[in-house]
Image (cartoon, helix red, strand yellow):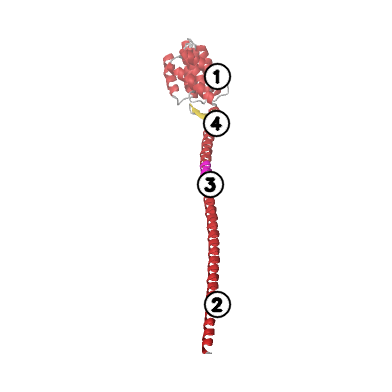
Amino acid sequence: MLLASGAQAGVFDDDEARKAILDLRQRVDSSRQAAESANQKLAEDLRRSTDDNGQLRRSLLDLQSQIDSLRTDLAKQRGQDEQLARDLADVQRRLKDQAQGVDERLRKFEPAKVTVDGREFTADPAEVRDFDAALAVFRTGDFAAAQTGFMGFVKRYPQSGYGPSALFWLGNAQYANKDYKSAVANFRAMLAAAPDHARAPEAALSIANCQMELKDSRAARKTLEDLVKAYPQSEAASAAKDRLAKLK
C-alpha cells in the first residue's frame, strides 16, 4: 500500500514538473514574442524618427537654401538700389549743370545794368560787347576803324544808354581823322541828347577845336564863351578861358 502510494506520488511530481516546464516555456515564448514585438515597435519608431529627422533635415536645408536665395536677392536688390541712387545722383548733377548752363546762356542775352561816364543804365550784352570793342580799337590808335565801329554802333542801337558816349568817341575818332565837320555834328548831337553828360564840357571844347581847325575863329570864340557859361567849374572851362585869351 505504501509502495503504491509512493509510486503515484512520483508520477504526480513528474507531471507537475512537465507542466511547470511547459508554463515556463510558454512564459519564455511570451516574453520573447513581447520582446520581439517591442523591438519591432522600437525599430519602427526608430525608422519613423529617422525618417522624420531626415525630413526635418531636408526641410531645414530647403529653408537654408531659401534664406541664402533671399540673401542673394537682397544683395542684388541692394546693389541695384545703390546703382539707381548713383544714376539718380548723376542725372540730378547733369540736370543741375544743364540748368546752370542754360542760366549762363540766358544771362548772355539778358539786359544788365552798366555804368559809363557816371551814367547808369540797362544794356543788352550785344551793346556792351560792341561798344567795348569799338572803344578798344580807338585806344589802339586805329581811328579809322574806331570811326567805323562807333558809327555802326550808333546806327544799330539808336536808343542805347551808350548813345552819348558813343557820339563823343565817334567825334573824337573823326577829329583824329581830320573829318572836322562830321566831328562837330556828332559832338553837337551828343550835347543835344545829354547836356548834363560828364563828357559834355569836353565835347564843347572839341567843337571849338574843330572850328579852329576849320579856320572859323568867330564860331570857335562863341563856342568857348558858351562853354565857360554852361560848365564854369569844369576843366574844359579853364582850358576854354586860356584859348579865349589867346584868341584876343
- Find residue 213 and report its horizontal and vertical position in percent: 46, 11
**Magenta stretch, residue numbers:** 73-81
**Mark 3 Cα within 10 Å, few/some/many (few <14, many 20+)?**
few
Q: Residue at x 55, y 31 (%)?
A: 102
What distance separates the C-alpha of mark 2 from that of mark 1? Answer: 150 Å
Which residue is denoted by mark 1 in the rendering?
154
Which residue is denoted by mark 2 in the rendering?
19
What distance separates the C-alpha of mark 3 from that of mark 4? Answer: 48 Å
Q: Amino acid at mark 1?
A: Val
Q: Residue at x 51, y 14 (%)?
A: 148
The dot on residue 102 is 4
Q: Nearer the viewer, mark 3 or mark 4?
A: 3
Q: Nearer the viewer, mark 2 or mark 1?
A: 2
- Residue 80 falls within the magenta-colored stretch: yes
Q: Amino acid at mark 4?
A: Val
Q: Quick one: SS at disc 1?
A: helix
Q: Tags 3 and 1 in contact by the CB under 8 Å rule?
A: no
Quadrant of image for the C terminus: top left
The dot on residue 69 is 3
**Mark 4 Cα within 10 Å, few/some/many (few <14, many 20+)?**
few
Please tell me whether the stretch drawn in magenta is mainly helix, strand or loop. helix
Q: Amino acid at mark 2?
A: Lys
